[in-house]
Image (cartoon, rainbow, N blue to C red):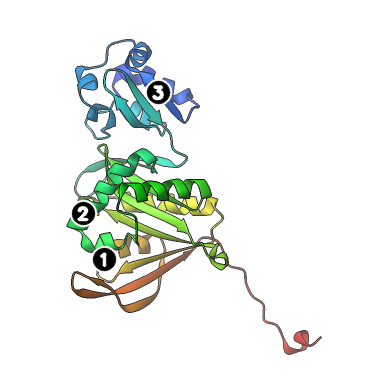
Amino acid sequence: MEHAIEKKYIPLANYFHVLKESVIQLSFSEIETIIGQKLPNAAYLNRSWWTKTKPPLQHFLAWTEKNYFVSKVQLGFYVQFERSAQQVQQNKTTNDATCTYIIRQAELNDVRNLTRFMHRLKELEPMNHYDFLQAPDTLSALRKRISHWNIKNAGQFFVAVVDGHIRGVAQGWRHISQGFQHRAMTSIQLMPEYQKAEIAHDLLCAVEEWAKEQEIDRLDASVLDGNHHTLTYYKSRQFEVEGTRLHAIHVNGQFYDEIFLGKMLTQPPTHTETTKEEVYA
């Protein structure tokens, strides 16, 4: 394996290596049978033991190395593991510290944590929050949007999970008008303490992969003028500034310009010039 893992959990890693199911529940006794010994007391007492993905702990590598994450824990009874269609586990060194995180598609059971994330972001980063582009801020509305997007293949939420908590979110959603079906909008938000990490880059990569799978040719984005971090993220992924709408948004008693960006995901067709003789031929 790429990272060191405690020897006792290698049998569990081998189990996930050959696992085909996208969702599986394992009882505590089944996990102990696989590893051939008892789980530590912390596994019985703390849900965070299962959801943490931060060094120096290494047991989580048994499942995260194969793109599984813990979606549900009933202490002393069972653990539910899931593998999303798109997911990546990263371990990167930033200027601040080593940041281990998982990027995956949001599930319905993430709704409560997603709502908390948005409300907290609104307190800490008002400008970043407004770049959410009308994301629902209630549990029922957010749950409805995720369900609708999954059923209609109309959009996707991606979350960055750090130490068991959502610390970044990216969205991609297709335009509903018939003449705009080849285009999709995207937005990205991060908690302030993770704005220097590589998380934004990987979130945008996930959105782009989703868009290509949906045969979308172009991604659109908009950012409040002054939200330098988000603007930098987009430019790092080759988004180009295409225009500015003056005094477009009013936030906390102040007007902000709105910057529009776009990125072509496919090569647009070349147009050959038509001569006057060809038109009247």
**Secondary structure at numbered mark 3:** strand
Q: Amino acid at mark 1?
A: His
Could you say where residue 94 lies in the image, as x and y percent from the top left? 24, 48
Residue drawn at x 24%, y 47% is: 116
- Compared to 140, does 83 lie above or below? above
Q: Nearer the viewer, residue 105 or 134?
A: 134
Q: Amino acid at mark 2?
A: Pro
Query: Can you see residue 92?
Result: no
Residue drawn at x 33%, y 20% is: 78
Crowd class of label 3 (few under 14; some 14 to 19; many from 20; radius 10 Å): some
- Compared to 7, does 124 lie above or below? below
User: What is the C-alpha distance between the residues marked 3 and 2?
Assistant: 35 Å
Give the quadrant of the N terminus: top left
The quadrant where residue 195 appears: bottom left
User: What is the C-alpha distance between the residues marked 2 and 1?
Assistant: 12 Å
Residue drawn at x 24%, y 50% is: 194
Could you say where residue 30 lies in the image, as x and y percent from the top left? 37, 14
Crowd class of label 2 (few under 14; some 14 to 19; many from 20; radius 10 Å): some
Q: Nearer the viewer, mark 3 or mark 2?
A: 3
Q: Which mark is residue 228?
A: 1
Residue drawn at x 28%, y 43% is: 113
Could you say where residue 266 lies in the image, as x and y percent from the top left? 55, 61
Q: Which residue is mark 2?
A: 192
Q: Amino acid at mark 3?
A: Gln
Could you say where residue 92 lies in the image, as x and y percent from the top left? 29, 43
- Compared to 242, does 200 lie above or below? above
Left or right: residue 97 versus residue 14 is: left
Q: Which residue is mark 3?
A: 25
